Image (tube, grey):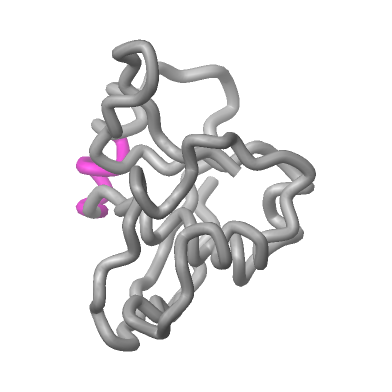
Amino acid sequence: MKAWWPGVPHHGGDGRSTEQVVATGDYGYAHSCVISENFPLKSLGVKTRDLVLLEFADDVMSNDAIAEAARLDLTRPTYEDALYFGAQHRDVQRQRPVVFLHEPWLGYFGRLDVLCL
């Protein structure tokens, strides 16, 4: 199943920090590594992106999810997509986990991580 959110605005360069955008998402928990130092918001001006969330019937490995997105001719999301989507669509994260398979961040302890809502 696909869920489509057309025209999710990015407000990069609007003066908000990563921490402020995360706070807007009203999460029950936000990992301490999701900060401007690790996930800086680039000055993009206001632009929009169409986001498609893929839902799988069973657990899948990330490489399988990425391959399915490529098969559907979808580009990989960015971490900015995750941050702004979470801030604008707060209830989606309460319905089910949402994983954004952007280029991984080399996290603490040498792990590769992506943002999950």
Q: Left or right: where does residue 100 sit relative to residue 42?
A: right
Query: Which region shows up in magenta?
Result: 68-74
- Is residue 79 depicted above or below 5 in this figure? above
Query: Picture coordinates of residue 15 (x, y %)?
Result: 42, 81
- Is residue 39 depicted above or below 47 in this figure? above
Q: Residue at x 25, y 76 (%)?
A: 43
Query: Picture coordinates of residue 65 (x, y %)?
Result: 36, 30
Tell me the quarter of the picture where residue 108 sits: top left
Q: Name the residue at the front extreme.
A: 37
Q: Is residue 80 magenta?
A: no
Q: Residue at x 21, y 42 (%)?
A: 70
Query: Picture coordinates of residue 81 (x, y %)?
Result: 40, 60
- Is residue 19 depicted above or below 10 in this figure? above
Which of these two is toward me, 116 or 54?
Answer: 116
Q: Residue at x 40, y 81 (%)?
A: 11
Which of these two is toward me, 99 or 80?
Answer: 80
Query: Picture coordinates of residue 34 (x, y %)?
Result: 48, 43
Tell me the quarter of the picture where residue 46 sits: bottom left
Q: Quadrant of the C terminus?
A: top right
- Looking at the rendered structure, the number of numbered marks drawn on it comes to 0
